[in-house]
Image (cartoon, grey):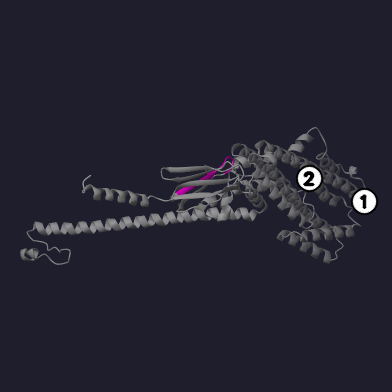
Amino acid sequence: MSHRCIPLLFLAMAGMLSAQDQQPATVTVQGHVFSADGSRLAGATVTMTSGPSTYVAVTDSGTDPGKYTLSFLAGTYDITTGKRDYRPELRKDVPLKGSSQIDFVLELACSSCNSGGSQLAWAANAWGTLFVVFLFFVSIWLVRWNNIARPNREQVRAEVDNERVRFQTTTGSAVAAYPYLDNLLNEAENATKWNRWTWVDFLFWSRGQEITGWARIHEFQRATITQIPPTGYLETIRARLQAIELDLLDIDKTHAKTLASNIKDALEEKTADEAPLRALLVEALSYLNDQRDTTFAQLVGWQTKTVWLVGVGCALIVVLAFAVGNAILFIAGATGGLLSRLARALKRADVPSDYGASWTTLFLSPIVGALSGWFGILLVVLLAKLQVLGTAFQAIEWGCPLAPLTLAMAFALGFSERLFDGIVSSLEDKVDSDRQAAKRAQQLTSKTDVSKKGGDGAETQVQAAASTRTSTGGSVATDDQGGNTDPQSKEKA
């Protein structure tokens, strides 16, 4: 070997040593994979990815379950941890320059959550929801007929018997002696009798029989005034006027107050003429009966509307449960709505008979709560993704309805109408703000386009003027970049 090759050999060896020093160091990462309840997960995979390089480790299932160990070149890696029936966890751009310990916690996946078992999975099934809706609907029909319809009918029959006794006590004659009056009470009684069409009333109550019965009874009351003997019953007429005056004072209407004032003035006159008092009694009784008939018809009509609304709500619940799923949210929301109504019913003050109107809120509360719970969770998931709600709501996932946080939120949405209204208001505010931002951006773009068009027009006018002067034999003085006029142009000028 010549002496000239020795220096080259030393340079090659130095380059190799330098290259070895510049290679990335090898790091070791170890740790454990846990489930949300704190137990260690064996068989989980931990994957480190950096460009084309991928390193995979499987957690131990022996003496140290859940442990993993990986050795690789230092750098920045994306770490993915996963296991069957658990949601994978991804950590991006994790710098790993030296040996370290990293632990992971995995949440149960939604498929595992929906698998049922001890978590009452039958309630999440659409068929289970259909069965619950069917029982609720049947219970409404039974309650309406036995606790609302039949008591109203029995009240009509009792009033018919009372009018017969009252008439005989006042006049000394039986109602049967007056065919017209007797026919009015018979029609009122027949309207509420059992017949072969009663099953139709059970399904579609009310079909107006009770309204007809009360109308006949009130007509009988007005007609009996003319049957009172013309003399010797002044005190009876005055007593009835005093009772009607008190009833009219309870009505907050101008007509009722005026009639009550007229009765008071007539009673203070101490007149012995019964004819004006009879006429005033008929007029006041006609108005009072008309108000009562109208109120009763409105309450009965609200009963019919309530049943229709309940039917539509139940149909929507069944369709959504089969078409979309997450039926357990309906159950949670309905429970919240029912509990809210029960809490209010316990604090409700005693009120006169409302002909079953108070039952309507009990019928509608579970339906409103069920729909509010289901759609409320849908809106919460949407607003969380739009970052309108706080980070706490991001843990609510549409695909995991049996998660405790999701169920609790559905219950709260069914319990509180204000909470659901607040979520809807948040969505409306978000839509309005986005629309206003888009409108401002469009206006700014329009102004920018107009400015550009204006600048181009001015430049065109300058160029046109310069061309005109040049064509007439003149010259134009131009400025250089420093702002100085071209001397040649001056000389030519």
Circle 1 SS class: helix
Asked where in the image residue 390 lies, by quadrant, the reply is: bottom right
* Magenta segment: 77-86
Q: Residues within 10 Å of mark 1 (few under 14, many from 20)?
A: few
Magenta stretch containing residue 90, yes or no?
A: no
Residue ranking furthest to the top: 196
Q: Earlier in the sequence, mark 1 or mark 2?
A: 2
Question: What is the quadrant of residue 86 in the picture?
Answer: top right
Please say whether residue 82 is one of the residues in the magenta stretch: yes
Q: Label 1 amino acid?
A: Thr
Q: Position of residue 143 (x, y in %)?
A: 78, 43
Q: Where is residue 341 in the image (x, y as percent from the top left)?
A: 72, 52
Q: Position of residue 425 (x, y in %)?
A: 56, 55
- Quadrant location of the N terminus in the rendered image: top left
Task: Tell me which corner region of the image, top left, top right, bottom left or bottom right, holds residue 491.
Answer: bottom left
In-front residue for pair 147/493: 493
Q: Is residue 235 left or right of residue 357?
A: right
Residue at left offset 75%, top offset 54%:
345
Q: Main secondary structure of the magenta part?
A: strand
The alpha-carbon separation of the residues under discs 1 and 2 comes to 32 Å
Q: Mark 1 points at which residue?
A: 169
Q: Is mark 2 on a helix, strand or loop?
A: helix
Q: Which of marks 1 and 2 is in front?
A: 2
Q: Position of residue 264 (x, y in %)?
A: 80, 64
Query: Which one is nearer the viewer's eye here, 98 or 195?
Result: 98
Q: Is residue 322 left or right of residue 198?
A: left
Determine which of the numbered discs, if any, sits on residue 104 in the image: none
Report which residue position mark 2 lands on: 148
Instruction: Report the amino acid beneath label 2.
Output: Ile
Q: Residue at x 88, y 59 (%)?
A: 234
